[in-house]
């Protein structure tokens, strides 16, 4: 079994060694990525990472089953998502980078609830349902998290999602996540389906970390008219100018941009990158306006995070579309969705 030490990769969750004199091996779906034969042993490598390749263009996305977190999107020869080099990929905590999924709360829990910040979607293992091709246009991966079956962490107590409370009240949800890779576009759609017998409220957000060369010169256009809640200064009530972009400029930025009533979809460009962020939402078959969070921790906050390099803030900015309130309760049998597209334009 000399091969085993060389297989100690944090993205591989299980090594099952079966003694056998004969073996054949074939598999087309994760998490069973490969079977390799070493004399009288079959080594089955179980991987937490699903790779989605658009064969016609070579664009590739990687999805870690912990949180169904998209950790990489390479298109036109360039990585467009930021992943901290210190990110934990072993399931011990939410992955720092890529596109973590936030549900059913955004931010810290309120009142007596002990649910961890940003909820349970990003800190449980999801099921890989299928990978399919849409002709030459796209490759699509589908992932699923059923609360009553799959969620073992991140619920806390004193809230409707506490396991005992949810069982008593008939609260259950199925999250389906579709990751679609095209030549110059990554579309990620989170669908929230109430499969229980009681209604619930929720927040949902795609916590997208974008890779940039220098965050101090980043300019985000498209948030004009959005009401600003500045979580650093505590100020609220200001409205973003249509003429001025949102900037980082070396300072800590943590702000929620609440959609104008006449602007339910998000269209934001992130200069000088080649990325445009578009997002739309629905609840109960009705349009649900999408807000946006912009975040960069700057030097002091970066140094305080164990899974974030001290200078990591210099090469990232988070532009995070979300359904952050004011949407209707999700009734039994009804669905909500939040879709984000990262569109890569040519220089």
Image (spheres, rainbow, N blue to C red):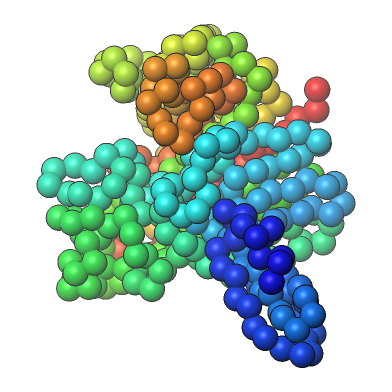
Toward the right, the furthest residue is 56
In the rendered image, which quarter contains the N terminus?
bottom right
Query: Is 208 placed left or right of 260 in the picture?
Result: right
- Residue at horizontal 66 percent and vertical 51 percent from the top: 62
Toward the left, the furthest residue is 112
Residue 246 position within the rendered picture, expressed as x and y whole percent measured from the top left = 50, 15
Q: Which quadrant of the structure image shows residue 213?
A: top right
- Residue at horizontal 81 percent and vertical 36 percent from the top: 76
Would you say residue 265 is visible in this rendering? no
Would you say residue 305 is visible in this rendering? yes
- Residue at horizontal 46 percent and vertical 36 percent from the top: 307
Instruction: Say above or below: 256 vs 330.
Output: above
Residue 32 position within the rendered picture, expressed as x and y whole percent measured from the top left = 65, 72
Query: Between residues 57 and 5, which one lies in front from this camera angle?
Result: 5
Query: Is 346 placed left or right of 199 in the picture?
Result: right
Instruction: Say above or below: 217 vs 347.
Output: above
Residue 150 position within the rendered picture, expressed as x and y whole percent measured from the top left = 40, 69
Toward the bottom, the furthest residue is 21
Instruction: Say above or below: 66 vs 276.
Output: below
- Residue at horizontal 78 percent and vertical 46 percent from the top: 59
Q: Which quadrant of the structure image shows residue 335?
A: bottom left
Q: Which quadrant of the structure image shows residue 50?
A: bottom right
Query: Is 49 placed left or right of 160 in the picture?
Result: right
Give the number of callouts: 0
Instruction: Say above or below: 96 vs 173.
Output: above
In the rendered image, which quarter contains the C terminus?
top right
Residue 63 position within the rendered picture, expressed as x and y whole percent measured from the top left = 61, 53
């Amino acid at each position: 079994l000399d091969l085993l030490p060389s297989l100690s990769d944090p993205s591989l969750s299980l090594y099952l060694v079966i003694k056998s004199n004969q073996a054949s091996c074939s598999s087309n779906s994760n998490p069973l990525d490969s079977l390799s034969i070493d004399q009288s042993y079959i080594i089955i490598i179980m991987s937490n990472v699903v790779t989605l390749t658009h064969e016609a263009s070579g664009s590739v996305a990687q999805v870690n089953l912990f949180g169904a977190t998209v950790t990489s999107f390479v298109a036109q020869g360039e990585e467009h998502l930021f992943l901290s080099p210190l990110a934990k990929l072993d399931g011990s905590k939410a992955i720092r980078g890529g596109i973590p999924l936030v549900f059913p709360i955004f931010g810290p829990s309120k009142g007596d609830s002990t649910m961890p910040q940003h909820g349970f979607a990003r800190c449980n293992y999801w099921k890989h349902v299928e990978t399919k091709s849409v002709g030459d246009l796209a490759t699509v991966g589908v992932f699923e998290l059923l609360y009553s079956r799959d969620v073992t962490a991140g619920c806390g107590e004193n809230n409707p999602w506490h396991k005992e409370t949810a069982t008593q009240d008939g609260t259950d949800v199925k999250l389906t996540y579709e990751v679609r890779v095209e030549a110059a576009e990554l579309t990620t759609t989170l669908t929230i389906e109430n499969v229980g017998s009681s209604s619930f409220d929720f927040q949902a957000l795609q916590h997208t970390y974008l890779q940039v060369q220098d965050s101090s010169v980043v300019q985000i256009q498209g948030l004009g008219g959005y009401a600003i809640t500045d979580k650093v200064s505590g100020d609220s009530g200001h409205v973003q100018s249509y003429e001025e972009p949102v900037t980082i400029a070396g300072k800590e930025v943590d702000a929620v941009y609440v959609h104008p009533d006449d602007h339910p979809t998000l269209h934001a460009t992130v200069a000088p990158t080649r990325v445009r962020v578009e997002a739309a939402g629905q609840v109960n078959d009705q349009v649900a306006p999408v807000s946006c969070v912009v975040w960069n921790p700057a030097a002091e906050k970066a140094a305080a995070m164990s899974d974030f390099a001290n200078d990591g803030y210099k090469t990232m900015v988070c532009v995070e579309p979300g359904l952050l309130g004011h949407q209707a309760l999700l009734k039994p049998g009804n669905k909500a969705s939040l879709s984000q597209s990262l569109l890569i334009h040519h220089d």
